[in-house]
Image: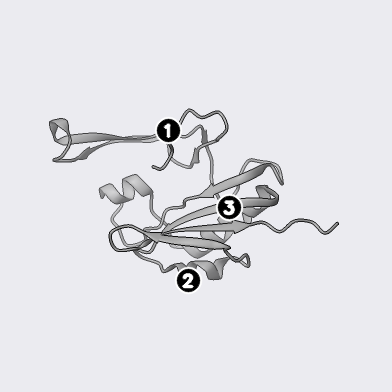
Amino acid sequence: MFWFDKEDERAVFGDIRREQHELKDSSSKNGSRQLVIDPDQQLDFRDLPFSDESFHLVIFDPPHLINNGSSGWLAKKYGKLGREWQDDIKAGFTECFRVLKPFGTLVFKWNETDVKVSELLKLTDEKPLIGNRCGKRSQSHWLVFLKPGREM
């Protein structure tokens, strides 16, 4: 949702989903709008198909909803966490740090609708450098991590 240019050759957009939905939207022409999830590469963040230390920058924006119904527009737009969500997010953090180069940057986006950031940070040993809260109710968080480098 935050890409300036989805065709930018410097980036690989990955998602486990490839789907399209028509969402009711009274503010849009004809009362609906299209939601298109069309990643460059269909992948699972728990098992990334990239070699170790492949990227300088990784953006991890996993689903954040647990209690939302599967047919609601929020679940369609953002995806939904499963029953084993803690294991999934922990595996996602592990994979993100695996594919980052030493001193690489991980940008992590989370919304506290169902799970607090403090609970989420227990799922990784890495500590964020900086973060920011935003949104109408300050529930969206952007956290920035820096992968440690190798000793010389």
Where in the figure is residue 88, as x and y percent of width and height? 52, 58
Tag shown at residue 87:
none
Q: Residue at horizontal 39%, vertical 42%?
A: 1
Q: CA distance from mark 3 to mark 1?
A: 22 Å
Lower sequence index among marks 3 and 2: 3
Q: CA distance from mark 3 to mark 2?
A: 18 Å
SS assignment at label 3 = strand
Q: Residue at horizontal 56%, vertical 61%?
A: 90
- Amino acid type at image mark 2: Glu
Where in the figure is residue 72, as x and y percent of width and height? 26, 50
Closest to the observer, 93 or 28: 28
| Residue, disc 2 | 119
Where in the figure is residue 35, as x and y percent of width and height? 31, 36
SS assignment at label 1 = loop
Query: In the image, is residue 100 above or below residue 120?
Result: above
- Amino acid type at image mark 1: Asp
Callout 2 crowding tier (Cα within 10 Å): few <14, some 14–19, many ≥20: few
Quarter holding residue 132: bottom left
Lower sequence index among marks 2 and 1: 1
Direction from residue 100 to residue 43 in the image, left or right: left
| Residue, disc 1 | 38
Q: Quadrant of the C terminus?
A: bottom right
| Residue, disc 3 | 106
Q: Nearer the viewer, mark 3 or mark 1?
A: 3
Q: CA distance from mark 2 to mark 1?
A: 30 Å
